[in-house]
Amino acid sequence: MFVEPIAAVGMTTGARDTIRFCRTADGVRVAWAVTGAGPPLVRTANWLSQMDLERTMPMFTHWFEGLTRGRRLIRYDERGYGLSDWTMGFTLEEWIEDLDAVADAAGLDRFPLLGVSQGGPLAVAYAARRPERVSRLVLNAAYARGRIARARDAAELDEADLDLKLTLAGWHAQDNSYQRFFGSQFLAGSPPQRWDEFTSFQKRSVSSANGAWFLEEQSRLDVSDLAGRVSCPTLIVHSRDDPRVPVSQATELAQLIADSQLVLLEGRNHLLTADEPAWPRFLDELDAFLAEEEPGRG
């Protein structure tokens, strides 16, 4: 794997972020960052990210505070959005290349991996294909099969297709009403102003063409076969009433991954917020799970 570190850029918003760039085996420039100190925790990219903006967004601040408690958080912008190259052609293989490049650039041989939402299928696939690198796997609001891939009959396929078409129409037209519908699925238990905050962040992080392409590819993902090959200890955490990814996807992952434990949280938010009881519960479960392999943290 060819990795070329580029010049580091310092960004300070609270705790210091050091944003760097590396290149994947196929030459795509990927932005990645390190926050905090201690044992590493790698978070897969998910919908959406832009590292120089995330630390300024109230809806993300608690994630940084929680995930860096005594740890070094490594995260990145996937190809196609954020500070990484806005190249087209998103596939699971390319997303794995992005993660490989970041792990290599960070000097990590073996590490725990966190997959949130659309980052979940990638985390599952990576743990299955790189068992020598992933020591523990944490999945939050994740799924094995995208909405189109998991449709069981014509009615569910029609619903999945309609959901995708409404979202794509909003992206292509940059229509706030359509995009608010999309945001409400991520923050169903939150007031509408948070949906608008989420929509605003999306517009700044990705082009409409790339956003539409990414969403369509994610809806067709199916890593259920790979999930059965995951051999590391796995923690699966999911909100019971998540409208974006149904809780049935969490139970399916728990059934497919042999060494897994499932924790269900009370709440409706797909993206956990700081003011809901589910958030500290998630952090407690994460800390306890990762402490099992971290000396001095048990």
Image (cartoon, grey):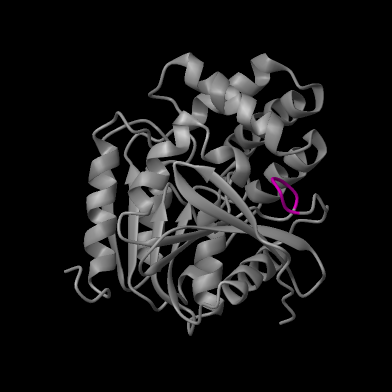
Position of 19 compared to 271: left or right?
A: right
Position of 131 compared to 39: left or right?
A: right
Above or below — where is 17 with respect to 154? below
Q: Which residues are magenta?
A: 80-84
Above or below — where is 51 with respect to 33? above
Residue 274 spot, x, y in % from top left: 33, 33
Position of 256 compared to 212: left or right?
A: left
Q: Residue at x 55, y 39 (%)?
A: 54
Q: Quadrant of the N terminus?
A: bottom right
Q: Residue at x 65, y 49 (%)?
A: 218
The furthest residue to the bottom: 132
Q: Residue at x 33, y 47 (%)?
A: 66
* Residue 56 seen from this side: yes
Magenta stretch: includes residue 272: no
Q: Quadrant of the C terminus?
A: bottom left
Residue 118 spot, x, y in % from top left: 55, 49
